[in-house]
Amino acid sequence: EAGVAQSPRYKIIEKRQSVAFWCNPISGHATLYWYQQILGQGPKLLIQFQNNGVVDDSQLPKDRFSAERLKGVDSTLKIQPAKLEDSAVYLCASSLRAGGGYNEQFFGPGTRLTVL
Amino acid sequence: AQTVTRSQPEMSVQEAETVTLSCTYDTSESNYYLFWYKQPPSRQMILVIRQEAYKQQNATENRFSVNFQKAAKSFSLKISDSQLGDTAMYFCAFTSYNNNDMRFGAGTRLTVKP
């Protein structure tokens, strides 16, 4: 079974530029998550999708971050414009269903973003 | 709001020995899940072990076991017979019983020395 795929693995941009990250979850997984992991910290949930609908985006900085999952499969996270403090690893995860912790989340390898 | 706090930023252990990583959490909920995740340099988060709060028995997965103290809100991970491949960042995490909004602590860097 293929795991969660993410691209690119690394991205370096100047502040105020735009950037997009792509995630393809495990086949059949209805729930998709985007996390931001700043160096030295644990991941922080940005947004959770159930199929193509948003379940929770309370921690997404909506003035500059956006995410979509149009067909309920793969997803794109965008930052526009980027700030220095957006430098982090962006992790995508998926689970078979939403709900509690009995639905294991499987993580992708992440995209390391550096904003100069 | 739920919070998760790791106790030690860094730890080291000799190969084949036992090490315990500690974590505390705060919640007002009675049912929830606790997790330990491993993150090697490749960055991919890997689930090590999961504990359901309503279960009295501590979870065990091969060389990994937990000491779950619900009243004290502590959740420690014991790694027995440490191997070089156990070198990684370890994160304690929490989710509510019916919500998969996972909250992570800051992580403990574990180094296994040959």
Image: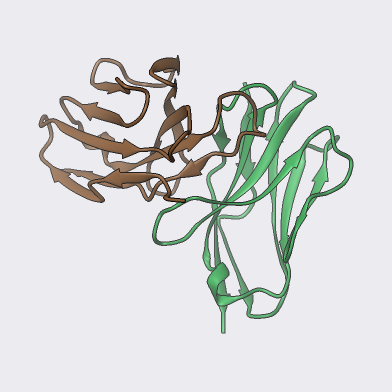
The chain coloured brown in the image: A
Against B73, residue B11 (above or below) is below
- The structure's colour scheme is by chain
In the picture, measured across the screen, residue A58 lies left or right of residue B105, that is: left
The front one of A80 and A106 is: A106
Against A72, residue A88 (above or below) is below
Q: Residue at x 22, y 47 (%)?
A: A8
Q: Tell me residue B98's x, y (percent).
A: 67, 21
In the picture, measured across the screen, residue A5 lies left or right of residue B88, that is: left
> Which residue ends up furthest to the right in the rendered image?
B56
Q: Residue at x 56, y 24 (%)?
A: A98
Figure quadrant of residue B38: bottom right
Q: Is residue A34 visible?
A: yes
In the picture, measured across the screen, residue B75 lies left or right of residue A27, that is: right
Q: Is residue A42 visible?
A: no
Location of the C terminus of chain B by quadrant is bottom right
Figure quadrant of residue B26: top right
Against A103, residue A113 (above or below) is below
Q: For chain B, give the colour.
A: green
The front one of A73 and A56 is: A73
Q: Tell me residue B24's x, y (percent).
A: 70, 41
Q: Tell me residue B57's x, y (percent).
A: 88, 46
Q: Tell me residue A15's x, y (percent).
A: 13, 34
> Which residue ends up furthest to the bottom in the rendered image?
B114
Q: Report the label total.
A: 0
Location of the N terminus of chain B by quadrant is top right
Figure quadrant of residue A37: top left
Against B75, residue A29 (above or below) is above
Q: Residue at x 64, y 35 (%)?
A: B94
